[in-house]
Image: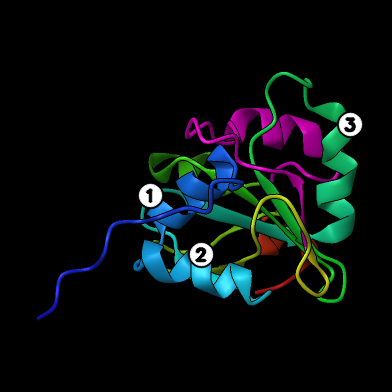
Amino acid sequence: MAATKPATPDPECDAGDTWLANCSLRPDLAYEVWELRGLVPIHCTQWLAAEMPLSAALHAVPRIPHHRPGPLLIDVRLDSGWWLIPLDTAEQLADVRHATVMPSGWPLHCPPTTRAVGSRVRLHAPDGSGHLMAPALLAGALGPGGGPRLPAEALGCP
């Protein structure tokens, strides 16, 4: 089996792109796909993606302290947003109505950090440090209606 070439970023590439490319299965190909204006499937192996409707993600943005937001990718055509959260924190969002934590290994199709590809753009780009969204802050920012789901029995469901 051939060895994967190390990531070779464009000199104008920012630290967030380097970090994202290195999270992909083939960092060398990530740069090529971005250069061709494509989306790179980055499998959630170093972080998880908390998916939610776009309106919920946008509602949360101004409620998160500006010095603490983690990476947020949105797709206006799909009406979805994805916050990147630490691997071991999925249970912290288990009872948050609007958030669905995608399983480890799930592919998130990512544009580079500095520009949109199609309808997909970053509202908060990774900065290259590995900083992720704190699930407790995200749950709090979702506010009323973003809290725990009611049990089915409360709604008269069997």
Evaluate if marks 3 and 2 touch, with contact meaning CB atoms under 8 Å apart: no
Residue 124 at x, y percent in the picture: 73, 41
Vertical order, 39 against 16 (above or below): below
Label 3 sits on what residue type? Pro
> Which stretch is magenta?
121-148
Label 1, on which residue? 46
Is residue 149 among the parts visible in the rendering? no
> Is residue 146 on the magenta stretch?
yes
Answer with the quarter of the image where residue 67 lies.
Answer: top right
Identify which amino acid the numbered label 2 is placed on: Tyr
Tag 3 or tag 1, which sits nearer the N-term? 1
Q: Which is nearer the eye, 100 or 43?
A: 43
Residue 16, image quadrant: top right
The amino acid type of the residue labelled 1 equals Gln
- As measured in the structure, the alpha-carbon distance from the residue carrying label 3 to the one carrying label 2 is 32 Å
**Rendered image: mark on residue 85:** none
Please indicate whether residue 43 sits to the left or right of residue 114 in the image.
Answer: left
Q: Is residue 97 left or right of residue 143?
A: left
Residue 27 spot, x, y in % from top left: 39, 62
Earlier along the polypeptide chain: callout 3 or callout 2? 2
